[in-house]
Image (cartoon, rainbow, N blue to C red):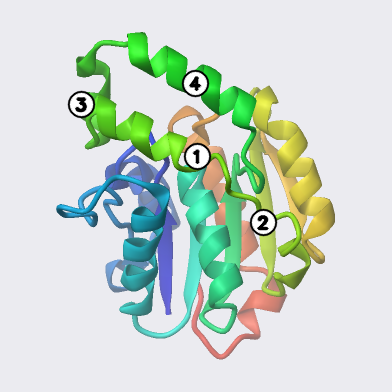
Amino acid sequence: MTYTFVHGLDQTASSWQPIIDDLEIDSQQVASPELFSLLGEDKPNYSNVYQHFFNYCENLDGAVHLCGLSLGAILSLNYALDRPEKVDSLILMDAQYKMPTFLLTIQNGIFRILPNSVFQKMGLPKKDTIQLTSSMKKIDFSKQLAEISCPTLILCGEKDKPNRKAAEQLSSEIRDADLEMVKEAGHEANADNPERLAEIVGDFWNKPVLSRSPHAHV
């Protein structure tokens, strides 16, 4: 059993460290992949990122508890749909289940005028970032959401207005999913309010419905 934290596009695995530290999870039960390092020499498109993420999760011992932000949430949702028997719980933060193509087009336009230095902290160069986000335009899980059967928590920063509607729709389409807004947080709640986020995640993973699983929990 592994608690797996999946970072967003403009983050790295270390972005989850404050949450992991507050939860005091046994380090042997924690995983947090560097998504773009997994790519190696492969092209930076969604299909390749997901395939490497899929393989990464498959190599983890036992069931997984997935906690993903933005791109990480999309990958986590994708994996939970493909491998429901492997996923014990799902936390989706600021997630889109059907990509808003208009917003992606605007975002890529902004990316094109930003200096290369802005992209250095991501671990993915500017050109590759644009290639990745462009490849995500056809993502649409809307017809599959009812297939999610594991305990699911939908989170959205209370200041993240662009993703609020998707969060509300996700919580209504996924069976028995919980929805919570993270106070004093925007799109990156793990950076904006890590203390509150850790509290929410810990409370969810300690719910009786999860504690009754055959796996040990936080």
User: What secondary structure is found at the residue carrying circle 4?
Assistant: helix
Q: Position of residue 191 (x, y in %)?
A: 43, 32
Amino acid bearing label 2 = Phe
Closer to the eye: label 3 or 2: 2
Amino acid bearing label 1 = Glu
Q: Quadrant of residue 197?
A: top right
User: What secondary structure is found at the residue carrying circle 1?
Assistant: helix
From this viewpoint, is residue 185 visible?
A: no
Looking at the image, tell me whether mark 1 or mark 4 is earlier in sequence order.
4
User: CA separation, marks 1 and 4?
Assistant: 29 Å
Q: Nearer the viewer, residue 28 or 65?
A: 65
Looking at the image, tell me whether mark 4 or mark 3 is earlier in sequence order.
4
The answer to whether mark 1 and mark 3 are in CB contact below 8 A is no
Q: Residue at x 42, y 41 (%)?
A: 8
Q: Nearer the viewer, residue 217 or 172?
A: 172
User: CA separation, marks 3 and 2?
Assistant: 31 Å
**Residue labelled with disc 3:** 120
| Mark number displayed over residue 141 | 2
**Residue labelled with disc 1:** 195
Q: Position of residue 48 (x, y in %)?
A: 34, 56
